[in-house]
Amino acid sequence: MSSQPKVRRRSRLYEKLLQLQIHTLPLRFLFHLETLYLFTASDFVSIIFPQTLFALFSVLSGPALTTNPSTQLFITLTRLPYTLLWVWLNLFILCVGNQRLPSSVAEDVQNKPWRPLPMHRLTPAQARGVQILSIPTVYLVSVLYTGAERETLLLFTLNWIYNDLDAANDHHLLRNVMNALGYTAFGAGATRVMCDSGFSLNGTKAPQWLLLIALVLFSTIHAQDLYDQQGDAARGRSTTPLVLGDARARWTIAVPVLCWSVATPTFWRLAWWAYCLPLGLGCLVAVRVLSVRSVQGDRTTFKCWAVWIISIYVLPLVSNPEVLLRQESGSK
């Protein structure tokens, strides 16, 4: 979904295994490890980093979004590896479920030849086997170590609807709904993982904030569809740029981005200065969406969108920065 990672079509390690026929255990382990990474390589900017930061900012906001009245910065940071692991594991299942499909393989041969299946690192049947094995493994990890089993089950369900039932291709609005629900589920699950033991999202402000975030994502997430219109058209996908046309689709991104840049700080009743970052980044995204119209330009614009959405995610912490003030006073 985000920019193509800077990897060669055939990595040096892959070339060694094919040309030199080196099958030592360390090299084979590194080869398979790289294969796992390549499944998710294009989603670090769009999902892993933003949704992990969503969890970090949400937990650090303390009672603004969680049941913890006094969040400790150090304890929260110790949960960061668990959160990253949970996000990556669930994303891995989603990516394998999508990339193993015949239409995805055909598209990736043209647009993302560095992915595992176009590189023949494994077959679609083997990828399906990996997915089948990964589902109970990831759920078990979620139950035993993260406490986010409900969000894991929700992501499994969304994965099935999105990929196996082909909801991603039926209608552009349904595609946006599924993406918004998936991103929000990642954020909610990551927050649950990062919460201290015995704490969770509260039942007052948190549901409202998650709903608002889902609406923000639903109305702007098709920024990721601007730079891959040729591939989506070849695959027969129903995306907003293809249905409405490129020019109209760009306005349906620029206007909501500007509106949400004002509405989200207002939701938290923040001071005027708190509007500066989301509104400034929102203006950047809106200007780029309307004026920069190339594949590489749209790819960069989506990266700007990812930074903009992070500026939205940080607002709960801005509304309740006491945890950072306590940490600063405690270090003196």
Image: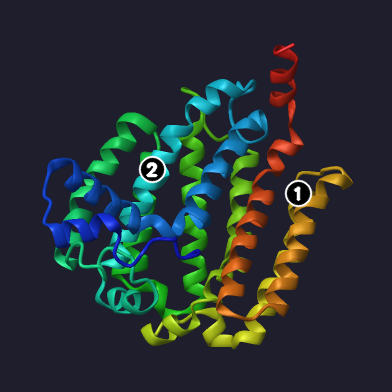
Q: Amino acid at mark 1?
A: Phe
Q: Nearer the viewer, residue 34 or 234?
A: 34
Vertical placement of residue 88 versus 106, above or below: above
Query: Which colour scheme appears in the figure?
Result: rainbow
Q: Which mark is residue 330?
A: none
Q: Earlier along the polypeptide chain: callout 2 or callout 1?
A: 2
In the rendered image, residue 110, in percent from the top left (x then y), is placed at 35, 79
Residue at 52% in and 31% down:
200
Query: Can the viewer see residue 229?
Result: yes
Within 10 Å of the Cα at label 2, are there few (<14), some (14-19), or many (20+) other Cα atoms? some
Q: Nearer the viewer, residue 202 or 170?
A: 170
Badge 2 marks a residue whose secondary structure is helix
Residue 71 image offset from top left, x and y in percent: 61, 23
Position of residue 267 in the picture relative to residue 91 (left or right): right
Packing grade of label 1 (10 A; few <14, some 14-19, many >=20) is few
In the rendered view, does 325 fall on the left or right side of 246? right
Q: Which part of the image, by quadrant, shows the C terminus? A: top right
Residue that mark 2 sits on: 150
Residue picked out by circle 1:
267
Q: Quadrant of residue 308?
A: bottom right
Q: CA distance from mark 2 to mark 1?
A: 27 Å
Name the image quarter holding residue 14: bottom left
Kind of residue at badge 2 = Arg
Q: Position of residue 20 (x, y in %)?
A: 14, 57
